[in-house]
Amino acid sequence: MFDPEIEALPFEAQAGIDDVRYRRQLGYLFANSRFYRAKLAAAGIDSAEAAGGLDAIAALPMTEKDEIRQTRSDDEPVGTHLCVPLGGVARIFSTSGTTGTPSYIPLTANDIANWTRISARSYSASGIRRGDALVSTYGAGPFVAGITLDAFNLMGLCHIPIGSGNTERLMTTVRLLKPHAIALTPSYALHLAEWAHGRGIDIGASNVARLLTAGEPGGGEPAMRKQLEAAWGATVTEVMGIGDIAASLWGECPEQGGMHFSGRGFVHVELIDPDTGAAIEMTDGAEGELVYTHLAQEAVPLLRFRSRDHVRVTTERCACGRTAPRVRCIGRTDDMLIVRGVNVFPSAIRDLVGGFGGEVSGVVSIRPRLRGFRQDPPLRVLVESGGSGAADDLAARITARLREAMLVSTEITVVPFGSLPRSDYKSKLVDWSDAAQ
């Protein structure tokens, strides 16, 4: 453990510890955030005292990403929730800006230190240790994944940054420098395995013992995990975060029973029903959407921020000694499709298709007919065959399996191996290019 005195503390004690920081953070918001003063006033709350403690947090309004976006302007590019002058900011990350102007995420020096510590806890959970050599495929900027590079330094790793889009260099590094671990997306790990196989390279014989996957669901999907571990001869674990809150909030240990919450003392986490917003207790087996509240953030602290990450919770004791709840990400609620009343997560389709083993490559592409999350059946899905081709009845068997497991009607088209796009970062499971308006 990176912080054993915190990570092994009984989690039941965490709320009492966090309550002090939470009340202080609320006072900070009322003093410094125009956005939250107005938002909370509209909900009838005019002071930190009126908001109460963590036991009353479910009564406060949640924060949506679009709300923040709407407060931005040329004069205030960060938004009205910025709590410090830009002169007090040490670093500014940004999003990709796929919906228009990039979103800016400023951090003070204290914020950077906190985020780095959270990430160090998350990545340390995987079992990597001081002195281990690790190759990273993340860019140092402008995205928040860059904070992970600071965490690798804090952990005392022999860090070998390669970045994305350098497959040949990365594989040469694996051969010559013999790293113990690689940090990458599961999509890229799969692409590298195919790249190596196509060149007659046995990556299972490399020194890589751990694949630390992040950036998208997949590393925790049983079928993809099995495929990656077989190809690499390595243990696959997951890390998950959210750019607005902290880059790496959850980290999985070698027990592979889900990702442990690593933000203790810095972030409060809740579980809600994504449809009603009602609070759900974090009990074993519970499912819902994660909602986060900063407890010690200075630049742009957020209160009850909706993540849109839909997870399943595990609370039973873990052999690693960490006591925080664990989660497995099922998918993102804003990526979810509804097919005649059935909620369908694209990553769940990929996982079930991956269960057909060597008959498929593990790469799928969902092709909705209409723009929007509501779709009429059957849902079109392209499935790439395995390297040896596909049996005549493969499409029918996949269709039946999806209907049985997910209660969804699909139109499966099996396409040749290598015909669907690969990614050296995140995969694109849903392709809207053919969808009608």
Image: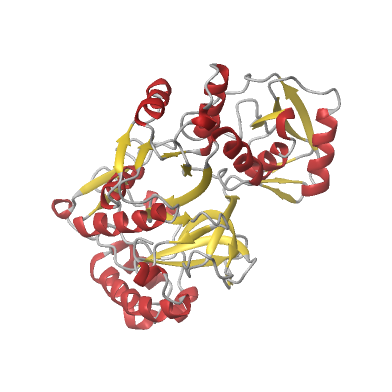
**Residue drawn 74% across the image and 19% down it:** 389
Viewed as shown, does residue 390 lie left or right of 34?
Answer: right
Residue that sits furthest to the top in the current view: 199
Residue 273 position, x and y percent, is 61, 64
Vertical order, 54 against 361 (above or below): below
Question: Who's the residue at 32% across and 79% down the image?
Answer: 20
Q: How many marks?
A: 0
Any part of residue 103 in sight: no
**Nearer to us in this view, 34 or 239:** 239
Q: Which of the 4 image quarters holds residue 365?
A: top right
Residue at left 32%, top 48%? 72
* Side of 64 where 288 appears, left or right: right
**Residue nearer the viewer, 376 or 46:** 376
> Can you see residue 362?
yes
As rendered, which of 375 and 329 lies closer to the eye? 329
| Colouring mode (rainbow / by chain / secondary structure / one colour) | secondary structure
State the image coordinates of residue 179 (x, y, percent, origin top left): 38, 36
Judge whether 269 appears above or below 200 on screen.
below
Q: Is residue 88 above or below residue 95?
A: below
* Quarter holding residue 93: top left
Pinpoint residue 61: horizontal percent, then vertical percent. 46, 68
What quarter of the picture does the N terminus occupy?
bottom left
Q: Classify 306 as above or below 332.
A: below
Pick the quarter of the image with the C terminus.
Answer: top right
Kindly identify the residue that appears in the image at 79 percent across and 48 percent down: 405
| Nearest to the observer: residue 237 or residue 129 | 129
